[in-house]
């Protein structure tokens, strides 16, 4: 079993001065923690993998392709591989668990 604590993952992510920390990588998926501050811009480019975002905390909008929705604590968003997507209008610091399948490469 592999078990993780969100507070420890956040501390590791912050210590590495990055917005993203991959903390699990297996044959069919990878999982990471993504964090953006209020007002920050999201530099993401489309990925070659399907993604699922689970918003742990914060509030923002996300645009996936041509669709936009508001996300907050507990929101889950699926992003198909190759589709442009970005978080924006981040009004509260955003912490998101990201699942890639297959693993982010």
Image: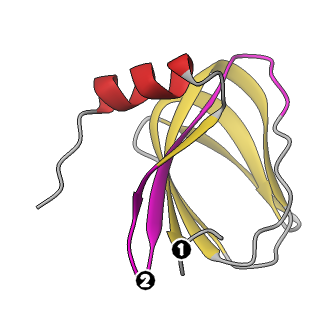
Crowdedness near tag 1: few (<14), some (14–19) or many (≥20) residues, C-alpha within 10 Å? some
Is the residue 77 above or below the residue 100 in the image?
above
Region in magenta = 23-41
Between 62 and 96, which is closer to the camera in this rendering?
96
Tell me which residue sits at (74%, 78%) in the image.
48
Between 22 and 44, which is closer to the camera in this rendering?
22
Pick whichever of labels 2 and 1 is earlier in the sequence. 2
Tell me which residue sits at (62%, 77%) in the image.
50
Query: x and y percent of residue 44 in the render?
Result: 82, 50
Query: x and y percent of residue 77 in the render?
Result: 56, 60
Query: x and y percent of residue 70 in the render?
Result: 66, 42
Query: Position of 68 compared to 50: left or right?
Result: right
Query: x and y percent of residue 87 in the render?
Result: 75, 42
Q: Quadrant of the N terminus?
A: bottom left
Q: How is the image coloured?
A: secondary structure
In the image, which disc is placed on residue 46? none
- Secondary structure of the residue carrying tag 1 is loop
State the residue position of label 2. 28
Between 100 and 38, which is closer to the camera in this rendering?
100
Q: Quadrant of the C terminus?
A: bottom right
Q: Quadrant of residue 84?
A: bottom right
Query: Position of 105 compared to 72: left or right?
Result: right
Is the residue 27 above or below the residue 32 in the image?
below
Tell me which residue sits at (80%, 22%) in the image.
40
Is the residue 50 above or below the residue 35 in the image?
below
Question: What is the C-alpha distance between the residues marked 2 and 1?
Answer: 6 Å
Task: Say whether marks 2 and 1 touch (CB < 8 Å).
Answer: yes
Between 3 and 80, which is closer to the camera in this rendering?
3
State the residue position of label 1. 103
């Amino acid at each position: 079993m592999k078990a993780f604590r969100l507070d420890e993952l956040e501390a590791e992510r912050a210590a590495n001065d990055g917005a993203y920390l991959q903390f699990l990588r297996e044959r069919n998926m990878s999982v990471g923690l993504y964090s953006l501050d209020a007002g920050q811009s999201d530099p993401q480019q489309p990925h070659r993998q399907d993604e699922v975002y689970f918003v742990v905390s914060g509030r923002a909008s996300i645009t996936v392709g041509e669709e936009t929705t508001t996300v907050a604590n507990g929101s889950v968003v699926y992003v198909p591989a190759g589709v442009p997507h970005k978080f924006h209008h981040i009004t509260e610091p955003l912490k998101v668990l990201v699942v890639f399948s297959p693993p982010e490469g």
